[in-house]
């Protein structure tokens, strides 16, 4: 791509939502909804009710107050009564005032290494978006796989999933959508993409949903691919001191992507919307024209690609480098990559660097605040003894088979996420599920891993995930079309999440059924 920087050093527009949890950090669109009014009243009412009730036997007063704060935050997160990041700031106010912990203890989780890992990942993604590298990668993947209709759907899904592992789900879907709409219009010359989908053209529907679903599935592959993965990593470190490395999670997440994308492709193109056309006139010409418009790879793209490749390599090989560089961490690697983007010149005489602060200001600060608030709440739940008390109280389900407990947990989370924010759901549920696991004599990861996976895998409704909303917002899909395919994928991903936890995650994280590891006691 040619240098997109003007003589004044300005940059092309970066997508307004280059992150995963829209509407995190934004005001609700339109009028204040009924559920928000309900949450605005229900949250404080529940807080005051718990405050007024006697402290249960065997529980400290500080733990009971933590439960009251947690109830307030959970209600406000689920109903979005106030902006989700604003709710995440409550521990900074309430914990010191209520005697749960000092301001230092409440504030420390907001600077958890996870926050800086994700910040660095966001900056790398912004660098790719600024210079158009992600678009070039996607178009080349599609051209390589082929331009027959099913091949195009597969190519779009593979390209979207691959990018979504490193760039936010939202930005990936936003970038792939206009390319997909252009391809759809080739199916019915003279008709718009919306008309093709409205006609029930299976190829058009499958392609649109394929982009949305692949963006969500691809994010599961890495710890920076989706905020729920990152929150899980931070929670385990904050609550138990258990560190999940970047490469370690890829051993679990990448197989989910490798299985999940073919599953989604089969559901879309074979089961729900069978693609019956054999050729797509002009498909290859369109992709070639898009690539030609990008021009030769520019210096900005090359530098971003080099930094991105080096960072990814360091993330993957960090365990092997521990002896040589003992202080190296995933967050440190991410920050190294981010700083390099500000140092590497694209046009030194004009003062143009790979990344400038104007572009960096597009960082999703709301997501980072949400991480901090969720981790602060999780730390208080653990430190006050509330976690142990919850675990003991849930001991009654110990008679259930573990696989049934996992199916119930995963199903509840995946269908709840259809209506609530992904990260807010994870922040509200993971501390409780971890406590329940230890109360049942199990490894916390046994419940936490499938719940974290499920919180990114809602496929039925436009409000479930930002990629779903973006594709639906294009006006070419109906809710029934999305729900028809989404219900199948919801069920399949419940089974996949539980199966991966039982098998692959059990090996990677050294989980023994019926055993609480020493680090969780």
Image: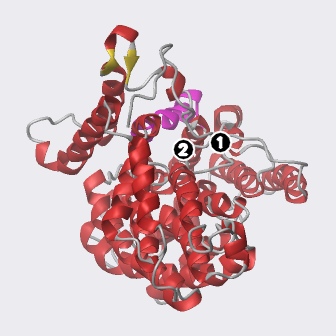
State whether the magenta stretch is mostly helix, strand or loop.
Answer: helix
Residue 361 x %, y %: 55, 27
Q: Return the disc, 2 or 1, that comes first in the chain's sequence.
A: 1
Decide which of 45, 407 is in the foreground and name it: 407
Residue 146 x %, y %: 35, 71
In magenta stretch: residue 42: no
The image shows residue 262, relative to residue 182, as above or below, that is below
**Quarter of the C terminus within the rendering:** bottom left
The residue under label 1 is: 88
Over which residues does the magenta segment extend? 101-122
The residue under label 2 is: 371
Task: Tell which residue pokes out farthest to the left in this image.
Answer: 324
In magenta stretch: residue 109: yes
Task: Tell which residue pokes out farthest to the top in this image.
Answer: 349
Secondary structure under tag 2 reads helix
Report the side of 138 relative to 85 (left or right).
left
Residue 450 x %, y %: 46, 71
Q: Are marks 2 and 1 in contact (CB under 8 Å)?
A: yes
Can residue 407 be seen at all in this image of the molecule?
no
The Cα–Cα distance between marks 2 and 1, rounded to whole angstroms, is 8 Å
């Amino acid at each position: 791509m040619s240098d997109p920087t003007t003589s004044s050093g300005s940059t092309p527009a970066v997508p307004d939502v280059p992150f995963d949890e829209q509407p995190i950090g934004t005001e609700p669109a339109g009028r204040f909804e009924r559920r928000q009014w309900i949450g605005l009243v229900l949250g404080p009412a529940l807080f005051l009710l718990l405050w007024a009730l006697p402290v249960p036997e065997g529980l400290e007063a500080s733990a009971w107050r933590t439960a009251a704060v947690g109830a307030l935050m959970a209600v406000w997160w689920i109903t979005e009564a106030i902006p989700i990041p604003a709710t995440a700031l409550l521990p900074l106010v309430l914990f010191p005032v209520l005697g749960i912990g000092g301001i230092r203890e409440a504030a420390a989780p907001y600077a958890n290494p996870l926050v800086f890992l994700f910040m660095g990942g966001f900056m790398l993604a912004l660098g790719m978006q600024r210079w158009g590298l992600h678009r070039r990668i996607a178009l080349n993947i599609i051209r390589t796989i082929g331009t027959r209709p099913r091949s195009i759907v597969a190519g779009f899904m593979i390209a979207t999933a691959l990018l979504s592992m490193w760039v936010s789900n939202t930005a990936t879907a936003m970038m792939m959508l206009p390319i997909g709409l252009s391809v759809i219009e080739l199916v019915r010359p003279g008709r718009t993409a919306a008309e093709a989908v409205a006609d029930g053209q299976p190829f058009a529907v499958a392609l649109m949903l394929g982009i949305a679903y692949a963006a969500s599935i691809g994010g599961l592959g890495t710890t920076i691919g989706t905020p729920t993965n990152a929150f899980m990593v931070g929670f385990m470190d904050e609550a138990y001191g258990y560190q999940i490395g970047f490469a370690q999670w890829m051993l679990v997440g990448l197989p989910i992507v490798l299985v999940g994308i073919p599953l989604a492709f089969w559901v879309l193109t074979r089961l729900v919307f069978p693609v019956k056309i054999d050729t797509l006139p002009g498909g290859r010409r369109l992709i070639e024209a898009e690539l030609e418009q990008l021009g030769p790879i520019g210096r900005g793209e090359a530098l971003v690609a080099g930094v991105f490749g080096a960072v990814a390599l360091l993330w993957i090989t960090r365990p092997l480098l521990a002896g040589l560089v003992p202080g190296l961490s995933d967050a440190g690697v991410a920050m190294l990559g981010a700083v390099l983007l500000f140092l590497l010149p694209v046009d030194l005489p004009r003062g143009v660097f790979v990344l400038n602060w104007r572009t960096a200001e597009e960082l999703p600060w709301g997501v980072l605040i949400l991480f901090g608030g969720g981790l602060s709440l999780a730390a208080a739940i653990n430190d006050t003894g509330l976690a142990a008390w919850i675990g003991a109280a849930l001991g009654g389900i110990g008679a259930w088979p573990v696989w049934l407990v996992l199916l119930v947990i995963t199903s509840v989370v995946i269908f709840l996420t259809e209506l609530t924010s992904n990260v807010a759901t994870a922040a509200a549920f993971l501390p409780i599920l971890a406590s329940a696991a230890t109360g049942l004599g199990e490894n916390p990861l046994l419940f936490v891993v499938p719940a974290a996976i499920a919180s990114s895998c809602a496929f039925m409704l436009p409000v479930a995930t930002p990629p779903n909303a973006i594709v639906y917002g294009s006006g070419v899909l109906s809710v029934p079309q999305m729900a028809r395919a989404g219900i199948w994928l919801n069920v399949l991903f419940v089974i996949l999440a539980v199966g991966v936890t039982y098998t692959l995650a059990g090996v990677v994280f050294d989980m023994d059924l019926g055993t609480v590891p020493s680090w969780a006691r």
